[in-house]
Image: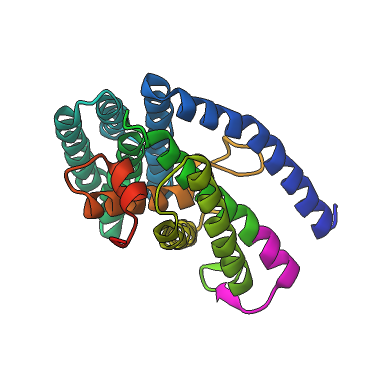
Amino acid sequence: MPAPDGLRRRELRLRILSALVMVPVALGATIWGGAAFGALTALASALIFLEWTAIVTRNKASRITTIGAVLIVVAIVLDAHAQPNRAIVTATLAWLLVAVAAYRLEAGSKRSWLAVGPGYALLPGLALVSLRSDHPLGLTAVLFLFAIVWSTDIAAYFTGRALGGPKLWPAVSPNKTWSGALGGLAAAVAAGSAVAAVGDVPRLLPLVGVAAVLSVASQAGDLFESAVKRRFGVKDSGSIIPGHGGVMDRLDGLIFAAVVAAAIGLWRAPEAPLARGLLAQGLLAW
């Protein structure tokens, strides 16, 4: 039986190899935009919903939840094609169908957990395709978000292992430390600022605060998924990605960060595209 260090090294190799496949696909679709980005985002959201359903229902699926997954895809694709009103109607229908399924299939608190699934899958998908609109800052906004989430995850892992120290929330995620969280935060600010500078975004200073908020949101998303898996006694959300587990395991930070990024954009510039509100306005009207 391999030693724990050997297992960790093998898992790290698998994670790196998987990333070498996933990152070019994600970046390629992001740069291409349009249908490619909408399709990839819709697929990821549907898989997130199906994994969520499997976790909270112990692999109990139904035709209604399957239809809900299809409607999630349709809603995000519609939004990517600049049809937000139809997307909202479709998204609402998906949520209602899953709520019906929850009451038909489950009892007690599991009903609520199942009904949360469409929002957990839909909102980040809609946020991402709205950020990656045809606005000139759309591509930069999504790359800014990716840089923050990815750098947070990578730096938190290596900083936490190198420095150790007090645990961040041992009851939920025993391996995460405060040193890792702060290391991830610092890396996110640096990476986000670099992307914004390359993207020729005006007023970089307010984006330091935006990057910090999104890094915290990303780490909160990671902790939330860990809490859900612990609540239902699940180690991984799935096994589709070698070394990472499921799609939820890989995108847990992005799920929260994307929604927060869209909320910041909407708050700062309600009448403007989300990308402009996020990047050109920042958290403060400086």
Task: Please provide the residue range marked out in magenta.
Answer: 157-169
Q: Tell me if 100 is positioned left or right of 74 in this view.
A: left
| Residue 9 drawn at (x, y percent) | 79, 50
49 vs 35, nearest the viewer? 35
The x and y percentages for residue 253 are 47, 52
Q: Residue at 72% of width from left, 65% of height from top?
A: 161
Q: Residue at x 56, y 27 (%)?
A: 25
* Residue extending furthest toward the bottom: 166
Give coordinates of residue 111: x percent, y percent.
26, 52
Q: Residue 4: image x %, image y %? A: 80, 59
Q: Is residue 233 above or below residue 41?
A: below
Q: Is 108 included in the stretch rendered in magenta?
A: no
Q: Name the residue at the top extreme.
A: 35
Q: Residue at x 44, y 54 (%)?
A: 204
Color style of the picture: rainbow
Q: Is residue 9 left or right of residue 227?
A: right
**Per the image, is 165 magenta?**
yes
Q: Is residue 237 visible?
A: no
**Identity of the residue drawn at 57% across and 56% down:** 190
Q: Residue 76 appears in which quarter of the rendering?
A: top left
Would residue 41 appear left or right of 18 to someone viewing this image? left
Instruction: Note whether 237 is above or below 139 in the view shown.
Output: below
Q: Kindly tell me whether residue 50 is visible in this rendering.
A: yes
Q: Nearer the viewer, residue 281 or 49?
A: 281
- Rendered-image quadrant of the C terminus: bottom left
Asked which quadrant contains residue 274, the reply is top left
Describe residue 183's horizontal placement relative to residue 205 as left or right.
Answer: right
- In this view, 95 is above or below 162: above
